């Protein structure tokens, strides 16, 4: 049994040895030859890794593709005033309005779907969110009774325009009416994403991959 003043040697550790405590050169050389072989393996591995890192050339920041660095997912436009709709109505692309309010659980579900649609269509359609509690006159102008309410505004389709021309081609404002956006679809509550995709595509929306 070891004395209380002597360290125990039952463990798999050794006390550190300093080269300053070895006085003779022969003792120092003997200590050097007793080093574990894995020390040399580690040194060799470090040298190989340094050489491999030096041989591999990584592309610099200015050599990378700009879109890969600054690419952003398009997000829905948030309407602050109804007057902002004027420029959207003059544009040929369809406008999908999502009327919502804070604290509405179904509105949060539709918020995720609208984000996906905005990222999918990009500039091929106008995806717009309208907070009925912050946009004055939105409830009255669009007769919102519950949220979420979705409204699709778009120009008449080609087949609709042909029927309109047959009915009233002689009207003085017939051409202007064909360029004017009207309410093409409306729904309240949860709506599936694929249904909204079909509605947008049927009313003139284009995906970025299809445009290229």
Image (cartoon, rainbow, N blue to C red):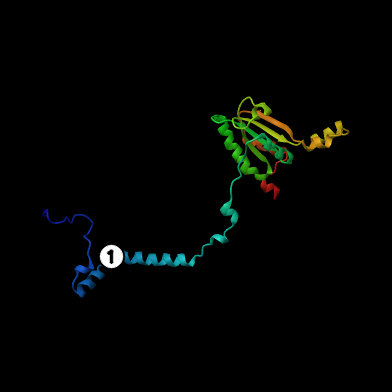
State whether residue 195 appears in this view: no
* Residue 80: quadrant of the picture: top right
Q: Where is residue 138 in the image (x, y as percent from the top left)?
A: 65, 30
Disc 1 residue crowd, few under 14, some 14–19, many 20+, Cα 10 Å = few
Q: How many marks?
A: 1
The residue at the point 74 percent across, 33 percent down is 182
Residue drawn at x 26%, y 67% as measured from the top left = 35
Which residue carries the number 1 mark? 36
Return the x and y of residue 132 as percentages of the image width and height. 61, 30
In the rendered structure, the answer to whether residue 42 lies left or right of residue 104 reads left
Name the spot of residue 40 as percent of width and height, x first: 33, 67
Front-most of 192 and 145? 145
Vertical side of 48 occupied by 85: above or below: above
Q: Which residue is found at the position 46% from the left and 67% from the top?
A: 54
Q: Say which of 196 and 11 sits in front.
A: 196
Query: Picture coordinates of residue 171 (x, y %)?
Result: 87, 32
Question: What secondary structure is found at the residue carrying circle 1?
Answer: loop
Residue 168, image quadrant: top right
Q: Can residue 160 be seen in this view?
A: yes
Residue visible at 74% across and 35% down in the picture: 181
Residue furthest top in the image: 145
């Amino acid at each position: 049994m070891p004395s209380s003043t002597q360290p125990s040697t039952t463990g798999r550790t050794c006390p550190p040895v300093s080269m300053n405590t070895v006085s003779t050169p022969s003792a120092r050389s003997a200590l050097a030859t007793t080093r574990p072989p894995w020390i040399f393996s580690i040194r060799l591995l470090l040298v190989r890794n340094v050489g491999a890192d030096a041989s591999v050339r990584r592309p610099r920041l200015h050599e990378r593709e700009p879109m890969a660095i600054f690419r952003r997912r398009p997000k829905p436009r948030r309407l602050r005033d109804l007057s902002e709709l004027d420029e959207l109505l003059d544009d040929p692309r369809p406008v999908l309005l999502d009327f919502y309010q804070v604290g509405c659980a179904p509105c949060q579900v539709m918020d995720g779907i609208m984000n996906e649609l905005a990222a999918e269509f990009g500039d091929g359609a106008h995806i717009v969110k309208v907070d009925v509690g912050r946009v004055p006159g939105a409830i009255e102008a669009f007769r919102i009774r519950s949220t979420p309410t979705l409204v699709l505004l778009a120009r008449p389709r080609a087949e609709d325009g042909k029927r309109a021309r047959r009915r009233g081609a002689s009207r003085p404002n017939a051409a202007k009416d064909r360029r004017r956006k009207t309410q093409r679809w409306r729904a309240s509550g949860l709506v599936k994403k694929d249904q909204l995709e079909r509605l947008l595509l049927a009313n003139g929306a284009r995906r970025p991959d299809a445009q290229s």
